[in-house]
Amino acid sequence: MKKVIFPVAVIIIAVALAVVLYVKQYGLSYYNESLAADLFLNEHGVFDYMLLEERLNDKFGESSRRGDLIGFIVKHGGSCEKSNCKLSVFTTLCVSSSALISIDGESRIIVKGHTDGC
């Protein structure tokens, strides 16, 4: 058993090291979180719900795109009931901020911030 564990561990470490070196060499990085933060946080570091509302209306504002809006919210960990949705935008151990998303009678998407905490 010991004869098998050591070579397997060496292979796992070698593969992990190769991946890290490959990413470092070719500059492959995951920037989505920092990009989203730069786009949706105001100058005080607070999430800009009005900007999210504008962007959602630009992308999904037509009544025919309502299903696409719901799919987008669910894809990003949110949930919907009828024409009301909730999408978490910030979570820590004790505080959670969410975007409450609804559609008014004119097919306009409305976003309001909501914070829950301990």
Image: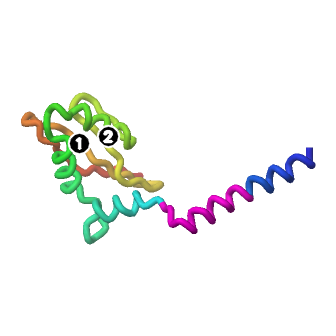
Give above or below for 73 relative to 93.
above
Name the side, left or right, on which 53 lies relative to 79: left
Q: Which residues are magenta?
A: 14-29
Q: Label 2 crowding class (10 Å Cα cut-off): few <14, some 14-19, many 20+?
A: some
Give above or below for 80 relative to 19.
above
Residue at (31, 40) in percent of width and height: 72
User: Is there CB contact under 8 Å for labels 2 and 1?
Assistant: yes
Q: Position of residue 4 (x, y in %)?
A: 88, 46
The residue that mark 2 highlights is 73
Q: Helix, strand or loop at disc 1?
A: strand
Which is more N-terminal, label 1 or label 2? 2
Q: Position of residue 2 (x, y in %)?
A: 92, 48
Q: Look at label 2 and name its amino acid.
A: Ile
The residue that mark 1 highlights is 101
Residue at (57, 67) in percent of width and height: 24
Q: Look at label 1 and name its amino acid.
A: Ile
Q: Quadrant of the N terminus?
A: top right
What predominant SS class does the magenta segment belong to? helix
To which quarter of the image does residue 15 belong?
Answer: bottom right
Residue at (20, 41) in percent of width and height: 60
